[in-house]
Structure formats: structure tokens, C-alpha cells
Image (cartoon, helix red, strand yellow):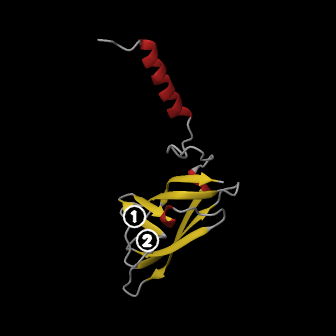
């Protein structure tokens, strides 16, 4: 039976520890080959209450904007969205829950620099929304 030399195991552990300590904490998702520097902060998610539905359920407006300073397009925008649901229809090409805790923006298609995707939803309380992962390209 062959055993791995200690130095190889230690080297691997050192690389893993280095990656964990010094990789950007903004996004720990591995970006595809050819992707550019792309922190999650390039996407801004804003929401506010905009009144109520006739049924009395609060209505919320959401804006998701591409704030990439170098003018990059951003695609595959995934938003942490808990158990997102709405009492009014949200266009699934705009915002769609693909699994619990993961919603897809713009059907995964690129959002141009400066562009904004917006939608409204109705729910008994505001749902926390934050960026999970994104992919930037020139």
C-alpha cells in the first residue's frame, strides 16, 4: 500500500488555507474561464413598499441594477430569496425562484451596464433579497 508523502498533504492543506484566507470574500463562486473580476457588489438590489393590494397584502417594488464601473455586462445573476412567492404574478423571465433560497434574474441573460430590472411582488412581509453569485463579461 502506498502512502502520500507528508509534504504533499501539507502543501495541499497550505494552499487550501491560503485560498480560504485570501480569496475575495465578496464572492466565493468560481468564475468561468474568461470571466473578469466580478464582485457581487456590482449588482445592487433595492426594494421598497409601494402600498397594498386591494386584499390588504403589502406590495413591494424591487429594482436590480448593474453598477459595474468598467461597463461590463452581468449575467447569471442569482439572488438569495428564501422561499420567495408572490400573491401577484411576477414575470418568470424577470425573476424566478429556481429552488428555495435561489432566484434567477433576467432568465440568466446579460444585464447591460447601467441597466435595471424591476418587478413588483405582494407578500405579507418584505422578503430579504441579496446577491448570491454573478458572472461578468466585457
- The residue carrying pointer 1 sits among few (fewer than 14), some (14 to 19) or many (20 or more) residues within 10 Å by Cα, namely some
Is 35 above or below relative to 62? Answer: above
Residue most toward the left? 1
Where residue 117 sits, quadrant-wise, is bottom right
Where residue 55 sits, quadrant-wise, is bottom left
Tell me the mark number nearer the camera, choosing from 1 and 2.
2
Name the side, left or right, on which 69 lies relative to 49: right
Q: Secondary structure at mark 2?
A: loop
Please give the name of the residue rendered at 60% of the width and 64% of the height, measured from the top-left corner. 65
List x then y, in percent, for residue 5: 41, 12
List x then y, in percent, for residue 68: 65, 56
Q: Residue 97's mark? A: 1
Q: Residue 92's mark? A: 2
Nearer to me, 19 or 36: 36
Please give the name of the residue rendered at 69% of the width and 55% of the height, measured from the top-left corner. 69
Q: Secondary structure at mark 1?
A: strand
Please give the name of the residue rendered at 39% of the width and 57% of the height, measured from the top-left corner. 101
List x then y, in percent, for residue 133: 50, 52
| Distance CA(mark 1)–CA(mark 2) | 8 Å
List x then y, in percent, for residue 45: 55, 63
Amino acid at each position: 500500500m502506498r502512502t502520500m508523502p507528508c509534504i504533499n498533504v501539507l502543501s495541499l492543506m497550505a494552499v487550501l488555507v491560503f485560498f480560504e484566507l485570501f480569496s475575495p470574500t465578496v464572492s466565493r463562486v468560481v468564475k468561468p474561464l474568461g470571466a473578469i473580476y466580478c464582485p457581487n457588489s456590482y449588482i445592487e438590489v433595492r426594494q421598497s413598499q409601494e402600498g397594498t393590494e386591494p386584499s390588504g397584502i403589502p406590495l413591494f417594488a424591487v429594482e436590480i441594477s448593474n453598477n459595474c464601473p468598467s461597463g461590463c455586462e452581468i449575467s447569471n445573476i442569482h439572488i438569495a430569496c428564501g422561499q420567495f412567492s408572490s400573491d401577484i404574478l411576477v414575470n418568470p423571465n424577470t425573476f424566478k425562484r429556481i429552488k428555495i433560497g435561489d432566484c434567477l434574474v433576467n432568465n440568466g441573460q446579460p444585464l447591460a451596464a447601467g441597466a435595471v430590472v424591476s418587478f413588483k411582488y405582494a407578500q405579507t412581509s418584505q422578503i430579504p433579497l441579496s446577491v448570491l453569485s454573478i458572472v461578468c463579461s466585457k
